[in-house]
Structures are given as structure tokens and as C-alpha cells.
Image (tube, helix red, strand yellow):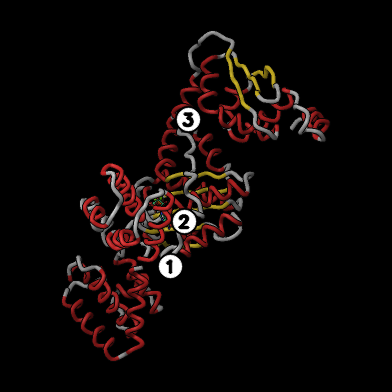
Amino acid sequence: MSETAKNLQDSHGANKKTETLPDAVLWHMVYEKLQEHVPQQFFFAFFEHLKVENYDGKTLRLSGQNPQIVEHIKKRYLKLLTDLASQAAEQPVEVELTSSGKPQRPPSLVNQERNYPQTIHLNPNYTFERFIKGPSNEHAYSAAKGVAERPGEFHNPLYIYGGVGLGKTHLMMAIGNEINKTKPWLKVQYTPAESFQSDLVEAVRNGLHAHFKARYRNVDVFLFDDIQFIGQRAEYTQEEIYHTFNYLFQNKKQIVISSDRPPQQLSKLHDRLQSRFHSGLVIDIKPPNLETRLAILQARSEEMKLKISFDVLRYLASRFTGQVRTLEAALVKLQFYSEHEKRPIDLQMAKLALRDLPQEDSGPQVTIDEILRVVARTFQVNEEDIKGASRVENVALARHVCMYLARQILPSLSLAQIAQAFGRSDHTTVLHAEKKVKELADRDDAFRVQLQELRAELQF
Ligand code: ADP
Ligand code: MG
């Protein structure tokens, strides 16, 4: 802030509440803040020639020469201007923009920026309060909460992965919403990987690479959603992600990444990037168990003010076992049905209304890789060894258990598929493994309990 503005502000600081800031001072404060939010070339092109007309304590009136620029500012920046002016004045301020000049051709920068994607806003409903915890997601919840409380300090980067519709985006946005509320001075940037990529392409096409960099590096908390969408051939994007993360990381900025798979399965993603993920916290979300599904349904139906009996909720919770999104969809559908038919929801209506929703729309949530991972961890052996030729007793047992669990949990897979997944060509190996495991479980109580726990861990 310039010296004059500081002096002016100081002389008014003492009784700011009762006295109105002079218009020039208010505009100066807004102008300074604005530079932090608007990339430089746009900032100078659009805001330098704005003039402050007056400020009456309620409305800040600004004017510009070029009507197209004024229109553009109104469309794109009015909310930001209003926010900044209100912050500066410490009270609600409206901003009005008028233009004095004749219509002219829009400057090319206006077109450039128009093509440039806008920031994606956080969904205000995605908060920690609205997130229902259960054994399937409580670790992810705590990690996210930790990040929101102390961004950049630990769990950096935080990598959350799990199937579709299990609450990854919800948790990420909850981090953003919470930080915006408790630490409004930090800049939060939420970006789905796909928009990062299209943004980059657009920026390069328009010669705005520097703008792109400024946009993604000038942040304190970077929420990067669905990184698996960055294709393996998108080397340029991968390179850019690498540099962006590196920059943020070196500057102790918080990075949160979501994905539908663990980092090691982002096959072609930069090796250097992968080791970076592993230096932080990698955590998974699983499909909610029955109890959690019931709790989610209860919370949602209360929010929707839906009169619905526990029987019906239990029916829904046992029928839809995959995504949380489907549970919500079922409630919306029931609400519609009940309003349409003008009668309360009962079990019969639920069965009828939801008959065309797929039983289990997300397919098997557990994958071979997950079985491999959990078993390897439990038996403290290497995943690679399980798939390899080792005959070491513990490794062979782990391999048998993997095959046994795959048979139990993934009935849609053929013997040959299971054999292949564990590096075997002969499908009778699987039958042999299954038999061995069953025999051992019959003999050995501790082993039987271990098997049960493995199953529970994989399926809930
Ligand atoms: P993902 O990003 O993992 O695909 P979303 O975060 O988009 O999933 O979640 C899908 C829907 O389910 C959202 O409406 C979200 O609010 C809701 N949801 C998911 N998990 C929970 C939970 N544990 N508690 C409450 N709502 C949830
Ligand atoms: Mg998502």
C-alpha cells in the first residue's frame, strides 16, 4: 500500500466504524487487493483506467471509458469487487460500474480471458458437518480435518483414493470450505484434473502460459481432484503438474489429491511425482458399511424433511450397497413418487419406485489389487513376491489367501482370470489354493480369525 493511502487509512482507522472512508482511499485499498486476484496483464488492461466517481458509505461508484471492458468487469469481477470493497470498508458495500464512452470493439484481451476457464466454486453443502463417518471413511475424514486445521504442516501431500461416489470430492471441498471460513487469508484452489488440463491447453494456445503458472502457483491450498483423468500420453500436462506440485511443496503449501486408485497404479504418471505422493499421507475410502449407509440415509432424509420409516431406510441401505450417490438418488426418487402419488412413503412404494434402479450399480468395489495390497500388508510380504515365483512359506501362503479371497469376494471372475492376476497360467492352481486355505482354516483357529478379518477389511 502506498504511503498516502496508509496515512489516510491510519487517520481514519481510529473511528472507522462511524466515519465513511473517502472514496479514493477505499478504491485504493480495493485496487491493491485486486492485484493479488487478477493476473497482471488483465489487471492492467481492465482496471488501470477505472475511475472512482464516489462512495456514499453504501455504494462505491466506478466508471470506465470502454463499455466492453466495463461489461466484462461486471460479468466477471463484480462479486470480487464487492467482496474486496466490503472487506476494506468493514461493512457491506455495493459496487456500481458505468461506462462513459461509446461502444467499441472489445479488446482482444477480453476475448482471451473470456475463453479462459473461471475458478470452480466450492459446493457449500460439502462440509465436514455433513459428512457421515464410519469405519470405511473415518481415516480419510480425520486426515482431511487435520489438513483443514493445519494446512501445509503435516499430511502433505494428502492423497485420498477410492471408488466413485464415496465422498472424495465432498471431503476435498470440505477442506476448502473449512479453510475459507477459519483462515480466509489463505487462497484455496479447487481444480478437477480435467480442467487443469484443458486450462493448460487453452493457456498455451493463447500464449498465456505465464498466466497459467501464476494462477496455479499463487495458492496456499491446492485441491486436485480425480488425478487419474490425466491420460498417460498427456506428457506435457504431467510435466506441468509435476512442476506445480514441486513449486507448491517447496513453498510449504498444502496439496490434496484425489484419485480412484492408489498412486502406484497411476501407471504412467511421473515416477518423481509418485515418490512425492508417498512422502505424504496416502489414504483410502471404502464403500460404507450397512450402519454408515443407514446413518447417511437418516441424515439426508431429515435434511429433505422426508417422512420415511426405519423399515424403508433399512430396505434402501441393504439394497444399495455401493455408492453414497445412489442412496441419495433413491431418496430423491422416493420423494418425487410420494409427492406425485400424494401418499406417504412405505415399503411397497419404495420397492415399486426403485425397481428400475440397478441393484448394485458400481460393480464389485473390491479389486484384485486391493486384495493383493491388504494381504501383502497383513502377511508382511511384498506384493511383487506374491505375484512372483517365490516358494517361501509365508509368501506362498499369502498367495493362496489372495486366491481364496478373490474366489470368495469376486465370484464374477473366472479361475483363469484369478490365476492370471497372480502370475499363474494354470487355473487349477486356484482350486488347489482354495482347498489349502480351507483346510488350514479348519485346523487353525487363529488363521480362521485372520481370514475373517481380512474379508471384513476388504468388504466394509
Ligand atoms: P466421489 O468424489 O468420491 O466420487 P462425492 O464426494 O462426489 O464422491 O460424493 C457423492 C455424493 O455422496 C455427494 O453428494 C456426497 O455429499 C455424498 N457423500 C459421500 N460420502 C458421504 C458421507 N460419508 N456422508 C455424507 N454424504 C456423503
Ligand atoms: Mg469426485
Instruction: Quickly name the residue at label 3.
Output: 207
Q: Secondary structure at mark 3?
A: loop
Q: What's the residue at 65%, 23% (across, down)?
A: 59
**Residue 335, x across and y down, in percent:** 32, 47
Q: What's the residue at 53%, 34% (across, down)?
A: 211
Answer above or below: position of 154 versus 215.
below
Q: Secondary structure at mark 2?
A: loop
Q: Residues within 10 Å of mark 3 (few under 14, many from 20)?
A: few
| Quadrant containing the N terminus in the rendered view | top right
Instruction: Quickly name the residue at label 2.
Output: 131
Kind of residue indicated by mark 3: Gly
Instruction: Quickly name the residue at label 1.
Output: 135
Depth check: give the residue in front, 99 or 60: 60
User: Residue lying furthest bottom in this view?
Assistant: 443
Answer above or below: position of 202 versus 371.
above
User: Which image quadrant for residue 195?
Assistant: top left
**Residue 39, x across and y down, in percent:** 57, 32
| Quadrant containing the C terminus in the rendered view | bottom left
Q: Secondary structure at mark 1?
A: loop
User: Residue lying furthest front in this view?
Assistant: 343
**Residue 114, x across and y down, in percent:** 46, 26
Whether residue 202 sits left or right of residue 153 in the image: it is left
Choose mark 2 or mark 3, whichever is in front: 2
